[in-house]
Amino acid sequence: MTETKINDKGAGTRAVWGGEQELSWQGATQTPVVLSVTFGFDDVDTWMKVGAGNAPGHIYSRNTNPTVHVFEQKMRVLERAEAATSFATGMAAISNTLFALLKPGQRVVSIRDTYGGTSRLFLEFLPRFGIEVELCDTTDHDAIESAIAKGCDLLYLESPTNPTLKVLDLRRLSRAGQAVGAGVVVDNTFATPINQHPLELGADLVLHSATKFLGGHSDVMGGVVCGRSDLVKRIFQFREINGATLAPASAHLLIRGIKTLELRVLRQNENAHGLAHHLKQHAKVDQVFYPGLEDDPGHAIAAEQMSGFGGMVSFSLPGNFDNVKRFLEKLHYAHRAASLGSVGTLIGPPAVTSHVEMTPEGRAELGIPETLIRCSVGIENLEDIVDDFDQALSE
Ligand SMILES: *Cc1c(COP(=O)(O)O)cnc(C)c1O
């Protein structure tokens, strides 16, 4: 199938066929895992051309690799982007993007609820290189717009956020960023390319921790950045040198995972929606955070910019942390573990996972109750997840 044809197709078709049209070895129908570190040329002229980037081909796997290339092209097709480049982890994607695009004296605007590692880059590492960072109250769109208007070289957004599932109006904020000439970057890890397309909402770059929904099985780490080709090229050239390259064996697992991305995410959307509704009317549950709930503060914007509300649900229990411990330890069908986006339900309190480095006061300021539980809903049968939660919530 040619590239122009596949770009018009649905996400399921793009997930299966994207990026894989050209590579075939001895008629293999699946992308070969090319572990070779280096690539040889009998003809020195061709070697010189490939080395100079004037002919297709590969020289050395830190820079490019055929299997890794297929993963990148699949993601480019899924995000309908001009270009894509990949990384060893999601944090490598984020830190390479920031360090490749920024220089001393520049200013970043972002939100207080970014992923924990991202937030550390903003608070600890970027300032060390003379880059100013202003982190705004996540749901105060007016405050974010005035911070942007004060001057902004890079606007960094994430929606829905971790762990309280706050929703940002990506179209409105991208427009504000573009108006002052800022590059607009969106972490789309929670939403996935099935539920949300930041590039269509006005962002320049969209990035993912591929470790989560893209891989989908908690057995591979990776990261990817897709978007404007001039920016992706600058990030790729930085990554070539700092070496945070995705391994070919990891690219293979990501390619395989993505083929079922639409199936998994549609099921996770449904399961999370069902579980959120169930918890909402449960006498033993305090608050439920899920943008798919009609009375959720982010619902209207989420309904406008997302085609599904995602597989993440957070909720709080009445009482103290002992109740959280008791509930978690009684669950049969959930891994009590960090991370998210896997086929199996994963659950944990942010107080000891994503936001462990914060004080209880800091977490309260971000609206994270001490009894909050974050759940990445898997693809199990909803009635079994609900039954399991019910027995764990009962005395
Ligand atoms: C996990 C995660 C990251 C970091 O990804 P790693 O693959 O763990 O490095 C970044 N952003 C979000 C939203 C995440 O959930």
Image: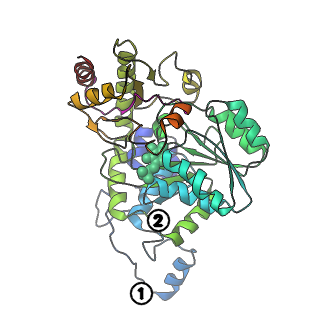
Residue drawn 52% across the image and 34% down it: 361
Is there any visible trace of residue 6 in the rendered image?
no
Q: Is residue 178 left or right of residue 168?
A: right
Q: Main secondary structure of the magenta part?
A: loop
Instruction: Tell me where residue 93 appears, x and y as whole percent.
Output: 51, 56
Q: Earlier in the sequence, mark 2 or mark 1?
A: 1
Q: How is the image coloured?
A: rainbow
Judge the density around disc 1: few (<14), some (14-19), many (≥20) Cα neighbours within 10 Å.
few
Q: Is residue 223 magenta?
A: no
Q: CA distance from mark 2 to mark 1?
A: 30 Å
Would you identify the image quadrant in which residue 313 lies?
A: top left
Side of 366 where 154 appears, left or right: right
Q: Which residues are magenta?
A: 366-382
* Among the 4 quarters of the image, the one containing residue 344: top left
| Badge 1 element | loop
Q: Nearer the viewer, mark 2 or mark 1?
A: 2
